[in-house]
Amino acid sequence: MIGDQLPAELDIAEHLGIARGTVRAALKELESQGLLSAGRGTGRVVCATPDAEPADPPVSPAAGQVLRETVVFARIPCPPVANNGMLVERAIFDAFAERGNPVLTVHLPSADDVSIQRLIDGRPVGVIAPHAVVSDAICWKILQKIEAAGIPVVVQGDGEKLSNFSRVISDHRAGIQLLVNFLIERGVKRPVQIRTHGLSNDLPYWGAARYDGFLEDASKLDPRVINDQHDTFAGGEDSRDADTFNHRVRLMAGLLVEQLTGPEPADALLFDTDHLCLYAAAAVRRFGLVPNRDVLLVGYDNYWSTSPLRRYEPAVVDATIEKDETAAGRALADLLLERISDFGDRKLHVRPPHLVTSPIAATPAFHQTT
């Protein structure tokens, strides 16, 4: 029972018929677990049971000071994909290394209530969460709890549910305008936007921003839209073998068949993200067409050149939008420091996009199929 005093080590050893050293080691282990306490001249006393919550170990003043100087980076480990999320993370770590702040990486979905409360009680400098984290419902609730406790939280992403946080976002609407202007300058007449998140129940904020302006900005042309009804290509950048890649190429060809074989075939294909242009390039060849000559391939994010799909498709992307993820990571770090000095003021930092074109796109014109 809690409060009971244990017999002496020698008495326990003789009762169990074991060496006194073995008894001492076992009792020391129970002390380290917080189940026993030992005082000079009083022997050992039961202070907890295995079924009870053990007492929290005391935090030294030095350890507490380190935590108060620490920035928490909330992270969800993702499978290998062709995006530049690691650039955001590296920029954040570099920014705080220059300032002398340690960065603690925390996997939020696996953190229980006790761990989160201990984190809050430690009063870190603040928390930074990239967009992969804030899109997770569990993580979002945890971030709300941390912010409500008076610890500043800065997130990468937009949307109504994130309005209570300070945010760094990319201007996706402006990015679509840049792409459409590029198509107009290149003499495109019939662009098609392929929406791989078109029918999702929970359309990501960036998808909505990239979709909403296309038809309006391309109103001078003959714009069309294809919705990937089964979200076949949403997140599908990690084809791990040639068979999977070719299977998706056939699916892409099925999406494009009416757009590429009709009396007025598309002369440009615009995708949510540019690694999908590599599936499209392989699909275009199945119709006897040449990518970048008969059909321009346009995307977003500037991921395509580092995509694992390059193992199977050598085509380049004519134009894409660079969001500058390194600058976004720096902006997240700067914004967190602003929140520290002015916690009550929610801040929004909008990152301007810029257009990136391939050398092929610099040619005066391309052959348009009639």
Image (cartoon, rainbow, N blue to C red):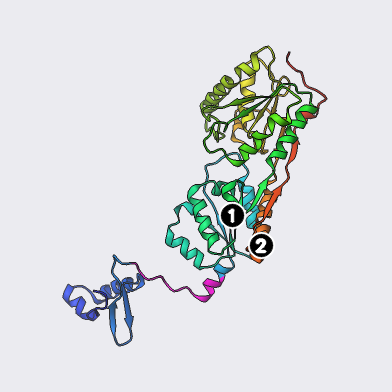
Depth order, front residue of 242/78: 78
Give me the residue at 51% from left, 64% from top. 120
Q: Which residues are magenta?
A: 53-65
Q: Amino acid at mark 1?
A: Asn
Q: Amino acid at mark 2?
A: Leu
Which circle's residue, 1 or 2, is located before the other in the chain? 1
Binning the other alpha carbons within 10 Å of mark 1 as few (below 14), some (14 to 19) or many (20 upward) gives some
From the top left corner, tell me how far across and down residue 36 is, in percent: 31, 75
Give me the residue at 47% from left, 51% from top. 109
Q: Which mark is residue 164?
A: 1
Q: Secondary structure at mark 1?
A: loop
From the top left corner, tell me how far across and down residue 353 is, in percent: 72, 42
Depth order, front residue of 293/229: 229
Depth order, front residue of 164/24: 164
Q: Which mark is residue 222?
A: none
What is the chief secondary structure element of the magenta stretch? Answer: loop
Q: Which residue is mark 2?
A: 337
Whether pointer 1 and pointer 2 mark residues with C-beta atoms closer than 8 Å, the reply is: no
**Of the residues tagged 1 and 2, which is closer to the observer?**
1
Q: Is residue 336 visible?
A: yes
